[in-house]
Amino acid sequence: MKIIQTQTLRGPNYWSIRRSKLILLRLDLEELAERPSDTIPGFYSSLVAVLPSLEEHYCSPGCKGGFLSRVREGTMMGHILEHVALELQTLAGMPVGFGRTRETATPGIYQVAIEYQVETAGRYAARAALRLCQSIVETGIYPQVELDRDLHDLVELRNEAAQGASTEALVKEAESMGIPWMHLETCDLFQFGYGKYQKRVQAALTSHSNILGVELACDKEKTKKILASMGVPVPLGMTIYSFNELAAAIDRLDGYPIVIKPLNGNHGRGITIDIRDWEHAEIGYDRAREVSAGVIVEHFYQGSDHRILVVNHKVVAVAERVPAHVVGDGVTTIAALVERENQDPRRGNGHDNMLTTIELDDSTAEMLRRQGVSLDTILPAQQVCYLRATANLSTGGIAIDRTDEIHPETLWMAERVSRIIGLDVAGIDVITTDITKTLSEADGTIVEVNAAPGLRMHIAPSQGVGRNVAAPILQMLFPPGAPTRIPIVAVTGTNGKTTTTRLIAHIFSQVYDNVGFTTTDGIYVSNRLIEKGDTTGPQSAQIILQDPTVDIAILETARGGILRSGLAFQQCDVGVILNVAADHLGLGGIETIEQLAKVKGVIAESVHPEGYAVLNADDHRVAAMADKVPGKVAYFSMDADCPLVRSHVRRGGIAAVYTDGYLTILQQDWVHRVEKVELVPLTLGGRAPFMIANALAASLAAFVQGVNIEHIRAGLRSFRASVQQTPGRMNLFNLGRYHVLIDYAHNPAGYAAVGSFVKNWTGPTIGVIGGPGDRRDEDLIELGRLSATFFERIAIKEDDDTRGRAWGEVAELIVQGIEQVAIDTKALVPHSILLNEAEAIEWALDNAPEHGLVTIFPDNVSRAIALIMARNPIIEDPTAVVLVEVPPTVAPTMEPLVEAIAINNNGKLSVK
């Protein structure tokens, strides 16, 4: 048994829409392919002995112990590995429960989908599950030491991936508020929202944070000075930069007790409090200098340490911070009490846990010395022994919620301080003997103002009520009613995706300033190419969603990206599914058209409840997706009398149809004539039916997203199947004696669509054809068969990359298809094999007949276009708009002479 391939799915995918974080394995059972679990001696009892908690797995029986009953009765090892991997993660503190196991078309090869919380842990759990199952099969046991090591490693991976209590709280709150988020790993920021509505955070530092306020808060001396000048009580003190200044500074404070701390520091590092003699003043100075060149010497105020959290200039939480300590029981040493305290599951290293592990060091020894005890001392019952002088949680302290106890005047002052310093999120440290009294009454003072304060003490205090402090931060970033996401239009299908995506983007550019879109040609923002290449996967989509200039995202979404990683988004506003036809079958575990339809259907199932799925009513597999759409459905059809469309409209639905030569949108009793097809350049004068269907889908997608008919019409009229706007998609060139058509069709459905145009050509036709080497034999034969039905001569070439096939193998299969047609028609279409694509194109152009059409299905679109441009094609545009300057009063007299006429505000006449 071995794992052949491991993939990580991070968004809605073929296996699950909602529980979309999955590890996908391609598993070869090898010698276990024909051995279900009930045929392996002792397997069941050994598995239960190692992981008795598998009893909690329901599985298909739907009851406790259901999975184990499947193991006892006999199930395949892929299914068992799935459940073991889930259980290992759960035992390591990452509860997960979703999994799927399916055998592929290759006997003994399985696909296993396993849910994860932490990607690295999910991958590890899969490998560990394989080791565990293999060991039981081979030896009958899995040593406890191995299981303990697996669980330890999984816990370590969980801790390494933890984002910290503050970030985690913000992410969870964003999810509860329906705000999309993503981790910008290159700069370790978190983005909430999409496109131009996004906000970024790093812990409690937000995109609203004022850089001047942050810089001021980081300079404790300047902070203290400005607060003092505004009448805020702050400690008496000064900043020194050399040891020689220390004695004078202490004298100016009228002696001890004092506090010494670094000028630039955080998390309690380098701070020494309650210093009462010169010896400890020297120690405190050295400790502070290890952190900062500048050292603050202040009067020490008696009282408890409190943190007041202010968000958007409103106090949202107050916590008393108590230094790390232990409480005696009369029988245990201080060292043992510390060890016991550190076993609290809430404690851990760094800021990722709710409490921090208590470390014993020189500061601890000094604190114990002051109290007259040592680590070996046994404290009387209930006696408190402090282990740190400072109350920071990062040094093992605890927090007690005091939000409901703070005096109103102190609350007012804290909010005023946040405005004085200029912080959107501020942690204000107050020393006071009684938080319920005013600072003046309790001899209190504000000792520090912190930018990016930690949130964990308020979220989960050791005592008192936890406060949801993430909510006010997100409400500050996104006030009620403020948008959090730009509209997302996702486009998928077997054929027409790129053209339709570009057309939709062009229509939306009539109403949006910055349209971002992804295609097989590249990533575009405001019609500018950002990155060239096939960019139809989730990584490319994320570039658009992360761009703060983008108003709307139009995302071509291909099969490959969905299978490899899932979608880049959880929900889209409009999901367009054009068609489903045989293509890429046999790749990625997708063997049938029905399975391919399920892949494409991921888009339909990811539509927002208030959004629309735009479905092709003429494709029964696409139309059937309506049953799983969580939002609304709109249909498009080339048949105005389509029964599905008619019944849908009668029920109040929206549809787009091709009728009486017009692109038409139907909405209840309304009939919107969008545009005459022959005036839509993309349709090549109405001679390309599949382009009409693409135009219907694009118009409908824009309409349901709120674009008015006038803007849709303007977009349709100004979009052309040109090298500039749709390279490689129905590009027609006039070379004088003949025309050349380039289209990137590479599957039978695509060939058939182009063929519908070729059949309408009045002159002779030549085809330059080929196919990708990774397609099935029957698909390549079909390309030849189809080509023989609409071309009069054929040149067969091969792609530069044969994708694993021998050179010439694809061509031979295509020839088989051509010969099949000859059997039926008794006439063999003349054909030549010219394997080099450039040579085949040149041959076709050299031998093009008068008034003929040369159709090229290229592998390399840019190379094919370059070969044509080298022959100086005639630049013509039958639907060009010519602008001439004429007085507005002349326009009416010209109306009978032109097809369309419009006058703009400058008196310019637009004549078609």
Image: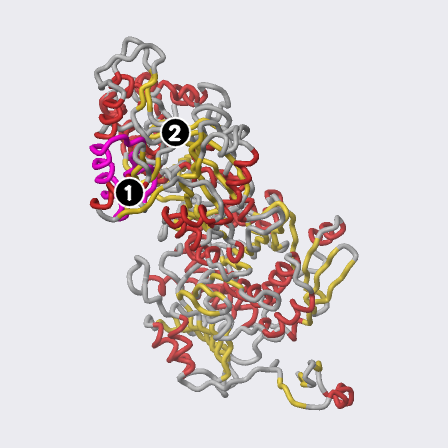
Residue 849 at x, y = what percent? 47, 84
Q: Are marks 2 and 1 in contact (CB under 8 Å)?
A: no
Label 1 belongs to which residue?
Answer: 249
Tell me what residue is drawn at x 26 percent, y 28 percent. Answer: 359
Amino acid on which the number 1 mark rests in the picture: Ala
Relative to 540, residue 279 above or below: above
Left or right placement of residue 144 versus residue 857 in this view:
left
The stretch drawn in magenta includes residue 436: no
Q: Which residues are magenta?
A: 265-294
Of 435 and 36, nearer the camera is 435
Instruction: Look at the image and say whether residue 272 sits in the magenta stretch.
Output: yes
The percent coordinates of residue 576 (x first, y second) are 57, 55
- Foreground mark, 2 or 1, reads 1
Amino acid type indicated by mark 2 = Gln
* CA gap, disc 2 and disc 1: 20 Å
On the question of residue 82 being in view, the answer is: no
Percent across and percent down for residue 487 are: 57, 55
Which residue is found at the position 46% from the left and 56% from the top?
546
Which of the pair 315/431 is nearer the observer? 431
* Horizontal arrangement in the rendering, residue 24 relative to residue 175 (left or right): left
What number of labels is visible? Answer: 2
Q: Which residue does the numbered mark 2 point to in the structure image?
A: 302
For the N terminus, the image quarter is: top left
Res. 887 image quadrant: bottom right
Q: Is residue 720 above or below residue 455?
A: below
Query: 10 Å neighbourhood of mark 1: few (<14), some, or many (≥20)?
Result: some
Position of the C terminus, as image quadrant, is: bottom right
Quadrant in the rendering for residue 323? top left
Could you say whether the residue bearing mark 1 is in a helix, strand or loop?
A: helix
User: Which residue is painted at 42% across and 45% down in the image?
Assistant: 451
Q: Give the camera-side residue of 193 and 728.
A: 193
